[in-house]
Structures are given as C-alpha cells and as structure tokens.
Amino acid sequence: MDNLSPVRFVKSMPVSMALWRACEDYLYKKYTTEIIHPILDLGCGDGIFADSITAGMIHTGIDISNSAIKKTSKLNKYEHLYIANAENLPFEDNIYSTVVSNCVLEHIPNIEGVITEVWRVVKPGGKFIFTVPSKNYNEFLMGTTVFRNLGFNVLAEKYINFINKTGRQIHCWDISRWQELLQSKSFKIVRYEYFMPARAMHIYDLIGIFRPFMLLNLFLFGKRTILPRNLHCRILEKTFKEIVSANPESGGGLWILAQKV
C-alpha cells in the first residue's frame, strides 16, 4: 500500500478532517504488520478509514450509531456489524488478535470501562491500536495560538472549551496518562508516535473555518469541495504529504500500540 496517498480522504470528508485522517492512515500503514486478523474495529463509523488501512475483510465492526452501521454495511468490508456500546461488548473473551479504534476513545466518558472490555475480548498478547488527540491538541490550534500571543488567555480558554464542546472531546491526554491507564488495565504500550505538529494543527484549524461553506456546497450541489475534486487534490497534495510524512516529537494527535499482558 502507498503510505503517501493522503488526498484520497478529501472526496469523502471536510478538508481539515481529511488532513487528520491522512496522518492516521500513514501511521497505521507504517505498522501494518501489527494489525493481525481477526480484527475488531471499535467505533467503525462509516468504515471508510478501516477500508483504507486493512487488506481483506475485517471480522467485526461496532458503532453506537445505527446510521453509521447502515452506511458501513454498504462497503461489504466487515463480516459482522453490531450496534453496540464499547463499555459492554457483546463478544466472548479472548477472540480478537487486534482491536483498532480511530479517534473514538476521547469521546467516551467511561474510558476505564472501555479499556477493561477491550482487554477482555482481545487474545493474550493481542494488540490494541488506537489514535486520540494529545494534550497538545487544543494548544496547537491556530485560534488558541493567536489568542495566547495577544495575551488574551481568557479568550484562548473559551476557544478551547468551544472546540471541545463542538467536537465532544473529553480526553485530550499526554502519553504518560494513557500509559498509566493502560498499565492499570494490564496493557503495556509497545510504541507510540505523535502526528499533526503545531504547523499542521494551524492549517487544520484554519481550514476548519471554511467548513460551513463546504457543508452548504454539499447541501446545494452534492459536493463537499468547492473546487473540482481533482484540482483540489493537486493543490493540497504537496502540503498534505509534507505533513503526513513528518515525524514530530510532539503533535496534536497520538497513535498508540498497546499489547495485552
């Protein structure tokens, strides 16, 4: 699989989210040998991302959204699909070699219950691979940076609260906090990587300003992008590839590979 084909996501989601997904896609494919069947996709959504990062059928996908499961079923990517809560998985113990979860855990209040359930259903020595926003996510946003530089810290905090509320994000943690939680649930972190450095987060946040116009374009004309898709991809490709292939020491996102012990 081509590790540098990030613009494929532009056709199916807002550009800012396509940039984030492209970074996640790159990291999953960088460690593709770690993703072993049978796989549980925890919070599968519309299934487009998992379809990109895995070859062949995925054994199981779950999501709490009925509409998401309906969309996913049209891909014919999953052997089994369930509407289910991640805190109470309807599966037997020790049946999956890999559990993947792409930007889901940060939205779930009872995160400890979810990790406990993942440990239960994954095989001994099995992998839990997931992405989440890091503690840098909010501080690296363009809006936060501008307000901080101007000395408007109160406005910066209000901006952060607005972003977290609209994005329904509860857990934006540092790797040390994830390590502490995972160890308490008998997982060990095998490796982790940051993605979306500060410059990328500035672009991500700036592009996000135009999302209402893109949604209006989708409503009126059935297209997410205002420019023709091929032109849009050519314009974005160089920027996307530079960001995606970066290996930052810190970033707005975290990719984590943990193993059941």
Image: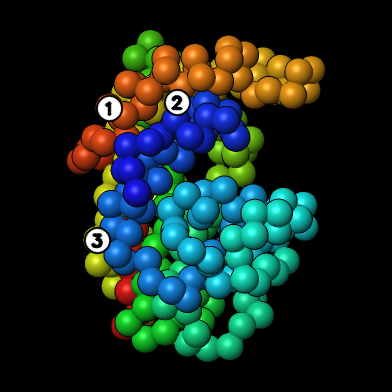
**Front one among 158 and 198:** 198
Element class at badge 3: strand
**Front one among 76 and 48:** 76
Q: Measured along the vertical axis of the image, is residue 122 above or below residue 177?
A: below
Residue 139 shows in this picture: no
Q: Distance between the residues labelled 1 and 3?
A: 23 Å
Q: Earlier in the sequence, mark 1 or mark 3?
A: 3
Q: How crowded is mark 2: few (under 14 residues within 10 Å), some or many (20 or more)?
A: many
Q: Give the numbered dot on residue 191.
A: 3
Question: Residue at 65% of width from left, 72% of height from top?
Answer: 80
Which quadrant holds residue 33? bottom left
Q: Which of marks 2 and 3 is nearer the N terminus?
A: 3
Q: How is the image coloured?
A: rainbow
| Residue type (three-letter) at the residue carrying disc 2 | Tyr
Question: Residue at 57% of width from left, 48% of height from top?
Answer: 48
Which quadrant holds residue 130? bottom left
**Front one among 203 and 237:** 237
Kindly check if marks 1 and 3 are in contact, taking CB atoms under 8 A apart as contact: no
Q: Earlier in the sequence, mark 2 or mark 1?
A: 2
Q: Give the numbered dot on residue 204.
A: 2
Question: Residue at 51% of width from left, 19% of height from top?
Answer: 230
Would you name the residue on which mark 1 appears?
242
Question: Residue at 60% of width from left, 65% of height from top?
Answer: 78
| Residue type (three-letter) at the residue carrying disc 1 | Glu
Instruction: Tell me the quarter of the image containing the C terminus.
Output: bottom left
137 relative to 116 in the view: left or right: left
Where residue 50 appears, as percent x and y from the top left, is: 51, 55
Q: Which of marks 2 and 1 is in front?
A: 1
Q: Residues within 10 Å of mark 1 (few under 14, many from 20)?
A: few
Q: Nearer the viewer, mark 1 or mark 3?
A: 1
